[in-house]
Image (cartoon, rainbow, N blue to C red):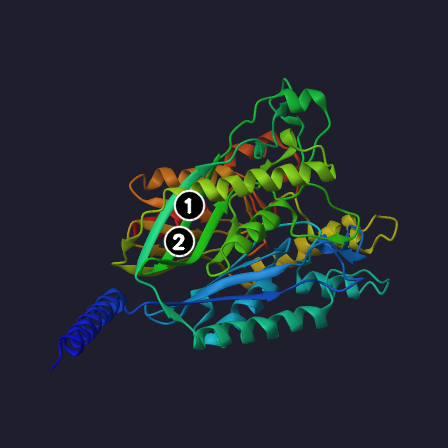
Amino acid sequence: MTNVTRRRFLKSSVAAGAAGVATLAKAAESSTGLRIAPFRFDVTPPVGHPLCGGWIKPVVGVDDGLEAIGFVLLGAGKPIVICAVDWTGILNGAHGAWRAALAEGVGTTPDRVAVQCVHQHDAPFVCLHAQKLVEEQLDGMRVVEREFFAGCLDRAREAAQRAERSARAITHVAHGEGRVEKVASNRRVGFGPDGKVNKMRGSSCRDAELIALPEGLIDPLLKTVAFYDGREKVLACHYYATHPMSHYGKGRVSSDFAGLARKRRQKEEPDCTHVYFTGCAGNIAAGKYNDGSPEARVQLTQRVYDGIVASEKGLKPTRIGKVAWRTREILPPTNPVFAADKLREMLANKKNDLANRIRPAMVLSWMQRVEQRTPIILSALDVDGISMLHLPAECFVEYQLRAQQLRPGRFVAAAGYGDGGPWYIPVKEAYPQGGYEVSVAHCSDEVDAILTRGIRELLDA
């Protein structure tokens, strides 16, 4: 053998050995047995479709499309599906239908599926039973177009099924958090001498007195949980608690500043799926920092994007050990301020504006659900020292902070706006204070103890 041939032989042998070591290392990394299958599909409503449940201007155009984004997790028992939808809300039977469709797509059960809304308002707000009730009035009111809704469910099944076929291994997980500046502020800040709420900051605000008041109780941190295949970041879930509206109501569909920040980050990292969850933001909005102008949307988008980037700077992937899926069922009683006969009168009264006819239909839908004893499912995905909580409707931020305090040794990320049947979920002490959120809360103040117990049991299991 010549020197040249010998050198080539040795070089090829070293290369083959290195490749073999790399292959073995990769196999070792993938030995968790876990696989993840990200998916996304379009849920943008067509022109003419109702927005925000039918009481604001319907779709006249699209500024930026709406998406449902999520993932299937394989290798921890039956498949687990988690999905975030750029809609205002999905209530009662409609929420059950979404979970059932995703479950059917991957061959799992609906209790192993979490569907959370981001809660933009230039977007659909869906309750199928409320749609039935308004249809019975025979005067053209609409909550949702059934054909469009059914098409979204078809796309959900197909997207999850297609994703599962191309699932990839995950070996590591990481978590981080970053502070978001000048976005979130508490809405319930204007209290009278009687201790009741007499003024509030909405999603936008131009009242100088209210703007000057402090932020109030918020969670300033945007949290991220990321999954890796070796060193490659495959999927990142971001959580931040604020109503995600800058301006709305003109019929222009938009994912608003939360969705726009997510899309910007997605464009930067096309090989990693980015999912955004709105946290417990029932009493949190951008009102202190948002005057409702188009310019404000740009500013808020930048600030949430900065929070996402900041939360990812400290990500330190660690090898995944234990994974568990946990659920608890709750069914809080109806708020006693609501009377079915009065609600039916409001629904039938053609002199009422659309909001004051469609909202009673949604309350009646909740009341029927309670009578039928159909529970809300709380869920949590636990990955080692991380808990990803999935909570219903418009929970006050106190529930998110409470969950973190219940398990200070864990990294707890809370997603609100799951099953929207209850509408707002205040804490008990908020009920005697009144205010808008309490006036439209479908559950009695007993919800505080019931929901808190469910959260505690999920975190303690």
Apparent side of residue 335 relative to residue 10 in the rendered image (left or right): right
Apparent side of residue 210 relative to residue 176 in the rendered image (left or right): right
Is disc 2 surrounded by few (<14), some (14 to 19) or many (20+) residues within 10 Å? many
Residue at screen point 69% across, 35% down: 204
Is disc 1 surrounded by few (<14), some (14 to 19) or many (20+) residues within 10 Å? many
Residue 60: give x, y in percent of width and height: 81, 57
> Of callouts 2 and 1, which one flags the residue occurring earlier in the amino acid sequence?
2
Q: Total of numbered circles in the picture?
A: 2
Foreground: disc 2 or disc 1: 1
Q: Is residue 65 above or below residue 399?
A: below
Residue 127: give x, y in percent of width and height: 66, 61
Residue at screen point 32% across, 67% down: 34
* Residue bearing mark 1: 312
Report the amino acid beneath label 2. Ala
Residue at screen point 67% across, 68% down: 149
Can the viewer see residue 450?
no
Residue 341: give x, y in percent of width and height: 73, 53
Can the viewer see residue 72?
yes
Q: Is label 2 in a helix, a strand or a loop?
A: strand
* Residue bearing mark 2: 226
The one nearer the camera, 371 or 441, is: 441
Residue 117: give x, y in percent of width and height: 57, 55
Quadrant of the image occupied by residue 285: top right
The one nearer the camera, 93 or 56, is: 56
**For the residues bearing labels 2 and 1, Cβ distance under 8 angstroms:** yes
Q: Is label 1 in a helix, a strand or a loop?
A: helix
The one nearer the camera, 140 or 63, is: 63
Report the amino acid beneath label 1. Glu
Task: Name the mark on residue 15.
Answer: none
The one nearer the camera, 287 or 316, is: 316
Apparent side of residue 62 relative to residue 176 in the rendered image (left or right): right
